[in-house]
Image (cartoon, rainbow, N blue to C red):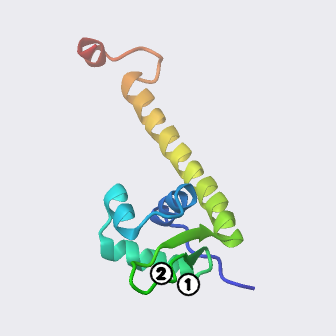
């Protein structure tokens, strides 16, 4: 059985960008995502190696820059779905924790607003 790629938020972000714009360059990804060009290069190579992304060259003319497009593979789409679910659950848990902390700060356990909190309002 093949090993599942580790769920990383930066991989998910890159995959979403590639899916939206297959002709995106590494430099464009770097600027848009505020990640160094070297790290984008490394992450893309890893995504390709893991079979989540496929690269196609669209320029046969040796005098021109190679035009490449990145495509999400079936495995890449499955990764995107799995990672999106994972990170949504994590964000929901974080939201619930913050909400609970807020409610504990605002109410002193009896449903009565603390006078200090009222003064701030």
**Secondary element at tag 2:** helix
Is 104 rendered above or below residue 7? above
Q: Looking at the image, how many numbered discs can be counted on the residues?
A: 2
Residue 48 appears in which quarter of the rendering?
bottom right
Instruction: Check if mark 2's residue and mark 1's residue have beta carbons within 8 Å.
Output: yes
Q: Which residue is mark 2?
A: 45
- Between 110 and 76, the residue placed more toward the observer is 76
Is 109 rendered above or below residue 95? above
Q: Residue at x 54, y 52 (%)?
A: 90
Q: Which residue is mark 1?
A: 49
- Between 111 and 54, the residue placed more toward the observer is 54
Rendering coords of residue 114 (x, y %): 33, 17
Between the residue at mark 2 and the residue at mark 1, the CA separation in whole angstroms equals: 6 Å
Is 70 rendered above or below residue 1? above
Q: Residue at x 52, y 83 (%)?
A: 60
- Between 51 and 4, the residue placed more toward the observer is 51
Q: Residue at x 39, y 77 (%)?
A: 41
Rendering coords of residue 115 (x, y %): 29, 14
Is 28 rendered above or below residue 63? above
Rendering coords of residue 46 (x, y %): 50, 80
Which quarter of the rendered picture does the N terminus lie within?
bottom right
């Amino acid at each position: 059985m093949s090993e599942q790629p580790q769920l990383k938020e930066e991989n998910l972000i890159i995959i979403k960008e590639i899916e939206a714009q297959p002709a995106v360059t590494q430099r464009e990804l770097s600027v848009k995502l505020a990640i160094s060009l070297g790290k984008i290069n490394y992450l893309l190579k890893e995504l390709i190696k893991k079979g989540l992304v496929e690269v196609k060259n669209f320029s046969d003319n040796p005098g021109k820059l190679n035009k490449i497009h990145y495509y999400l593979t079936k495995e890449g789409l499955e990764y995107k779905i799995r990672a999106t679910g994972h990170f949504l659950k994590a964000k929901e848990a974080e939201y619930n924790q913050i909400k609970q902390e807020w409610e504990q700060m605002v109410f002193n356990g009896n449903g009565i607003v603390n006078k200090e909190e009222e003064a701030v309002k």
